[in-house]
Amino acid sequence: MSSNMQQNIKVWDPLIRIFHWSLVGFFTLAYLAEGEDEWMNIHSYAGYSILTLLVFRLLWGVIGTHHARFINFVTRPSIAWAYLKELFTGKAKDYIGHNPAGALMIITLILSIGFTGFSGMALYATDGQGPLATSFFATWPEGTLKEVHEFFANFSLFLIVTHVGGVIVSSLLHKENLVKAMLTGKKQRPLIQQDEHQ
């Protein structure tokens, strides 16, 4: 059997792909609409949508398909660091699902974007608006909440840019189109590796 023969392997289920690209869209919308009074409703509803998506991802990370479940890809930061070093020496192991560095980025992004959304809701509550308006979060200092919200929004943007850079580097070094894989849900591998990766 020729080693050049390729097979399509299903990796990302439709819900994961919808989550991913919806998160991209809503985060972009929320970030661009921030700071403008006339866009505040759009900013806040984009934020609510993001938090809803994160709740879904946490749930799907427990009960979802194989490559979506946290137990199948979350690992220690030291393993992620070792993977990065191996990646740039051309000796990194091939992963069908998330590699260790990608897994660490996903967890960090979920936490950072989650803090961004929650601090935004708390900030909104100081104006007597939103689902936290009648909670004790509404009594927190507005200035502090604003600084926290802006910090995590900008930190999340930094992580996203880093993530995109990692996708590009990994795609080039592993000679595969990771963006296409997140669109189609499939990755290509040599046919002889079928049993190894399933």
Image (cartoon, helix red, strand yellow):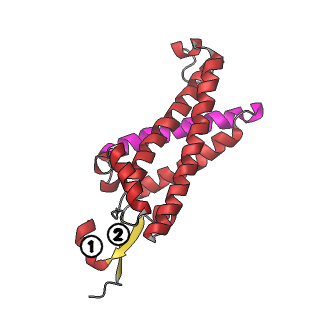
Which residue appears at 30% of the width and 78% of the height?
A: 191
Q: Residues within 10 Å of mark 1 (few under 14, many from 20)?
A: few
Q: Looking at the picture, how far across and down is residue 174, in whole percent?
A: 43, 68
Give the residue displayed 36% in from the left and 44% down from the top. Answer: 77
Front: mark 1 or 2: 1
Looking at the rendering, in which quadrant would you find the N terminus? bottom left
Q: Is residue 75 magenta-colored?
A: no
Residue with the most extreme bottom position: 1
Considering the numbered disc 1 on the image, is that residue within a helix, a strand or a loop? helix
On screen, residue 8 versus residue 26, left or right, reads left
142 with respect to 103 (left or right): right
Disc 2, SS:
strand
Q: Residue at x 35, y 69 (%)?
A: 9
State the extent of the magenta-drawn residues as a range: 36-62
Q: With 187 as the anchor, is 39 left or right in this view?
A: right
Q: Looking at the rendered structure, which numbered label has been put on residue 194?
A: 1
